[in-house]
């Protein structure tokens, strides 16, 4: 009976930790969004793109925290990194974003940002895969 109570207490702590992490990530999004709000008026669909990314990323963080201590957390970490890479590539396409504003065309080149972000995500993917392999070798 004490073992079950200990498990419930450990799960409650994980739930609390997951809620706090999710709230912190969402709070960071809200703080950053205050600076990005003027851009969303000029770029159509920008707010929806950012919100979808943030919600899915926070979902991965919360579920990963709930599953900590199991092998599934490592699979979610790999999935999170693959999501970040895929979403960056799909949302930025070739890295050049253009917007027509009145009679002017504004073009922004995000190729360097895209390369750096994908490279960092690839490092995160490699780390998550190595952590998965390490977990599997320690827990046969």
Image (tube, rainbow, N blue to C red):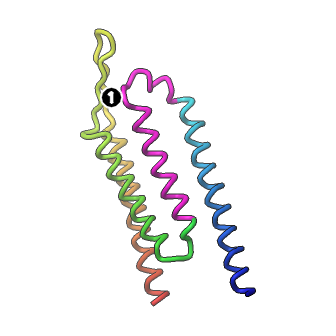
Name the image quarter holding the N terminus: bottom right
Q: Residue at x 67, y 79 (%)?
A: 7
Q: Quadrant of residue 103?
A: top left
Q: Residue at x 35, y 46 (%)?
A: 88
* Label tally: 1
Which residue occupies the extreme left position in the image?
Answer: 94
Chief SS of the magenta region:
helix
Q: Is-magenta flag for residue 44? A: yes
Magenta part of the chain: 36-65
Q: Residue at x 71, y 74 (%)?
A: 9
Front one among 131 and 60: 60
Front one among 119 and 67: 67
> In x, y percent, where is residue 134?
45, 80
Name the image quarter holding the C terminus: bottom left
Which residue occupies the extreme bottom position in the image?
Answer: 140
> In x, y percent, where is residue 44?
36, 26
Residue 96 versus residue 86 in the image, above or below: above
Query: What residue does disc 1 label?
Result: 108
Q: Residue at x 62, y 49 (%)?
A: 23
Residue 42 versus residue 2 in the image, above or below: above
Q: Is-magenta flag for residue 119? A: no
Which residue occupies the extreme right position in the image?
Answer: 2
> In x, y percent, where is residue 115?
32, 47
Front one among 53 and 12: 12
Q: Quadrant of residue 109?
A: top left
């Amino acid at each position: 009976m004490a073992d079950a109570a200990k498990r419930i207490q450990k799960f409650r702590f994980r739930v609390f930790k997951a809620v706090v992490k999710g709230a912190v990530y969402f709070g960071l999004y809200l703080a950053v969004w205050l600076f990005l709000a003027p851009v969303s008026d000029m770029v159509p669909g920008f707010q929806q793109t950012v919100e979808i990314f943030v919600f899915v990323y926070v979902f991965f963080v919360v579920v990963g925290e709930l599953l900590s201590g199991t092998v599934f957390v490592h699979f979610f970490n790999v999935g999170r990194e693959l999501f970040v890479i895929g979403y960056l590539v799909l949302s930025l396409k070739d890295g050049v974003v253009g917007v027509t504003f009145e009679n002017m065309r504004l073009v922004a080149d995000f190729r360097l940002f895209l390369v750096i972000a994908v490279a960092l995500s690839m490092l995160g993917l490699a780390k998550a895969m190595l952590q998965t392999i390490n977990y599997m070798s320690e827990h046969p």
